[in-house]
Amino acid sequence: MFATLSDRLTATFKNLRGKGRLSEADIDATAREIRVALLEADVALPVVKDFIAAVKERARGAEVSEALNPAQQVIKIVNDELVQILGGETRRLRFAKQPPTVIMLAGLQGAGKTTLAGKLALWLKDQGKQPLLVASDLQRPNAVTQLQVVGERAGVPVWAPEPGNGVGDPVGVARSGVEQAKKQLHDVVIVDTAGRLGVDEEMMRQAADIRDAVSPDETLFVVDAMIGQDAVSTANAFVEGVGFDGVVLTKLDGDARGGAALSVASVTGRPVMFASAGEKLSDFDVFHPERMASRILD
Ligand code: GDP
C-alpha cells in the first residue's frame, strides 16, 4: 500500500533538487503535483485541500536555511503535514486506573474486527496483561467460533454465549463478559461486536447498547483500508452512531491506494492507534504517524 503515493511524491521532490530558492511559481507547481498525488492515492478531498493550503503557506514562509535546501524544506513540510493528518503523536492505549480496561471493537462486517481482537489480545498478553475476549458478535454465523479459534491461537480465553448467559443477546454477553473478567481478575476485556456489510441502523443501535452496557475505556473503530472512500463515510457514520476514541486500519498489506484510510483520522479527529497488515496474529502493531509518514516519503 502507498507505493504509488510514495513514488509520485518522490518524483515531485526530485524536480526541486538543485533549486537555490523557491519562487512562487515553483511552490504552485509543487503544490499542484502533491495535490494530484494525494487525489490519485484516494485521499479525501477536504483533507487534500487543507493539506495543500498548509503546505503552500509554510513553503512561502520558509526561511532560507543553511541546513536545508528548498527540496529538503518541502519534504520536511510535507512530512510534518502527513504526520498531522495521521493524528500527530502516537496515541497509545489508555488503561483504566481501576481494572479491567474495557476495549470495544466496532466496524463493518469484514473489516477485520475478530482477527484484530486476537491480535490485540496477543499483543496485550505479550506485555504481561491477562485479557479476556468477549464474543458479542452474534450476527455472523461463525463469528463466535472464529473468535474461539483466534483466542486459542493467542492463548487467551474467550467468553462466549452459552445457555444461561445470554444466547442471542449480544448486550447481555458483553455485560456478563465484563462481570466474568472482574471475577477472574482479567485486567483487559476486548469486546468483539457485530458489523453489517453496510452502515445499518440496527447494527449502530446494538453497538451503542453494548457501549452503554459496558462503558468502554477505549472504543476502537476498525476499518478495512481497501474499501476506498467508503472508509471515510463509514467512519463518519460510526462517529455519529457509536462514537470512538481511535481508529484501527486493517489490510494495509493490500495493494489498494489507501489514501482514504489515511484520511479517516483527519476527517473524524480521532487518531489511528493500531495497524494490521496481514492475517497472522503477529501482523499487527501500534500505529506511529511519524513512521508512516517517513515510510511514504522514503
Ligand atoms: P470482522 O467481520 O470485522 O470480524 O472481520 P474478520 O476478522 O472476520 O476479517 C475478515 C477477513 O479479513 C478475514 O478473512 C481475515 O482473515 C481478513 N483480514 C483481517 N485482517 C487482515 C489484514 O490485516 N490483512 C489481510 N490481508 N487480511 C485480513
Image (cartoon, rainbow, N blue to C red):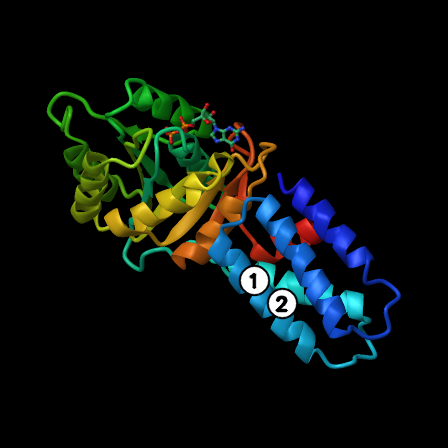
Q: Is mark 2 within 8 Å of ligand 1?
A: no
Q: Please tell me which residue is depicted at 85% across the width and 62% down the height of the picture.
A: 17
For residue 50, side relative to residue 157 (left or right):
right
Q: Quadrant of residue 62?
A: bottom right
| Above or below for 187 versus 132 | below
- Which structural element holds mark 1? helix
Q: Is residue 107 visible?
A: yes
Q: Residue beneath label 2, please? A: 55
- From the viewer's side, name the closer residue of 208 and 74: 74
> Separation of disc 1 and disc 2 at Cα?
6 Å
Q: Position of residue 272 (x, y in %)?
A: 47, 51
Q: Position of residue 297 (x, y in %)?
A: 70, 53
Mark 2 packing: few (<14 Cα in 10 Å), some, or many (20+)?
many
- The reply to whether callout 1 and callout 2 are in contact (CB within 8 Å) is yes
For residue 138, side relative to residue 103 (left or right):
left
Say which amino acid is labelled 2.
Answer: Val
Q: Residue beneath label 1, please? A: 51
Q: Say the numbered circle drawn on residue 207.
A: none
User: In what quadrant of the picture does the N terminus appear?
Assistant: top right
For residue 69, side relative to residue 119 (left or right):
right
- Which structural element holds mark 2? helix
- From the viewer's side, name the closer residue of 23 and 229: 23
Mark 1 packing: few (<14 Cα in 10 Å), some, or many (20+)?
many
Residue most extreme to the front: 25
Q: Please tell me which residue is depicted at 45% across the width and 50% down the height of the picture.
A: 264
Q: Please tell me which residue is depicted at 32% across the width and 23% down the height of the picture.
A: 143
Say which amino acid is labelled 1.
Answer: Phe
Q: Position of residue 52 (x, y in %)?
A: 59, 63
| Above or below for 30 versus 207 | below
Q: Quadrant of ligand 1?
A: top left
Q: Position of residue 86 (x, y in %)?
A: 52, 56
